[in-house]
Image: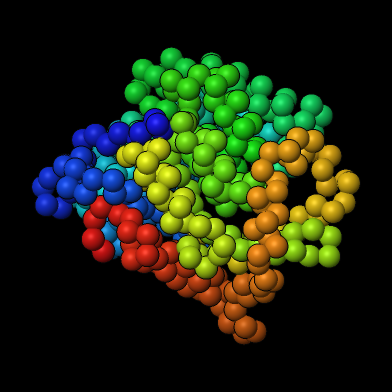
Amino acid sequence: MCAGAGVLGHTVLSGASPGATAAQAPGKVKLGFDHFSVRSYGWKAPQLIDYAGTLKVDSLLLSESNVFESDTDSYLRELKAKADGLGLVLYSGSGSICPTSGTFDKKSGTAAEQVAKAIRVAKGVGSPVIRCYLGRGDDRLMDGGIERHIEETVKVCKDVRSQVMDAGLKLAVENHAGDMQSWELAMLIEAAGKEFVGANIDPGNAVWTMEDPQSNLETLAPYVVCTSVRDSAMWETADGVSVQWTAMGDGQIDFRAYAALLAEKCPGVPLHIETISGLTRNFPVSTDAFWKPWPKARARGYAKWLALARQGKSRPPFTPAPANTDKRAAEQAQQKSELERSLTYCRTTLGLGVRSA
């Protein structure tokens, strides 16, 4: 069973607690979204909370620290009060906590300092977790491979263990941008300490590591405390496989089975939509050079991943706008549409969400 993400101290519009709401719908997976879905708007936390309120979702993942304009007690209390009034549970996050990763932001302080700030924010807004990550796929090509970065991330986690546990939180390490397969993230969590480190699972990122999303969830289910979810389309190319991220229901992932497994193994963990639709990436798996940073991947679920690709057909990438059209406005419209269509699919087709839209 997953480490469920508890919900404390929040109220819903009816005046009942979120726990009471969930009790009225046993087995229901809570539904929300990751703010990155609407990244082109540049909204900060108050605007994102207002928008989430209009969508009547159960939770909102504010996955990056840059959406918080302050970490003062008064500002964080205001955010929590706003979310409470809209019946929302807030989940919060930070960035890379691996000092050796190419994604680590050295300008924001040491990893321990960044986690300390993230703890303050999470406690202030009532988040049960701190979403964070190791890095990205390029880290696998550095000296020492991904193992070096896993070791450094484990060290950071152990250094902040007492602060995280004293705050009653969990670090939710994401399988992020092709950095780790599920077994590698599970190894990291076990080495760091599963009593305070869990997984923020992302099936879209799983596909970037040549893993079938269902297999990825099966491996990580005992550790999942948060999610960032999108669908994917896949097809064979001249030298390998292309992957395009899509809105929920537009790709090839069996989310009926995925949602059922999440409900069974991870009770209390919400499904947060994180659409990044149209982004297409080619994986030249027919070349030997491709596999250098992935020496064990072909023996760990690659056959299921390849089978998905063989079922798909090529798709054009998203074109944000025709000539003489505002590109940013077109991206905003696309992002909002993809997110809202995904939420509708999750509610009507998958039966997700405790609250009614």
Q: Position of residue 158 (x, y in %)?
A: 54, 16
- Is 340 situated above or below 127? below
Residue at 62% across, 32% down: 183
Residue 327 visible from this viewpoint: yes
The quadrant in which residue 316 appears is bottom right
Residue at 55% across, 64% down: 251
- Is 62 situated above or below 248? above
Q: Position of residue 198 (x, y in %)?
A: 47, 30
Residue at 78% across, 65% down: 237
Residue situated furthest right in the rendering: 288
From the image, which quarter does the C terminus lie in? bottom left
Residue 279 visible from this viewpoint: no
Residue situated furthest left in the rendering: 15
From the image, which quarter does the N terminus lie in? top left
Q: Position of residue 348 (x, y in %)?
A: 33, 66
Q: Is residue 3 left or right of residue 159?
A: left
Figure label count: 0
Taking depth in this image into account, of 149 and 306 the one nearest to the observer is 306
- Is 25 situated above or below 186? below
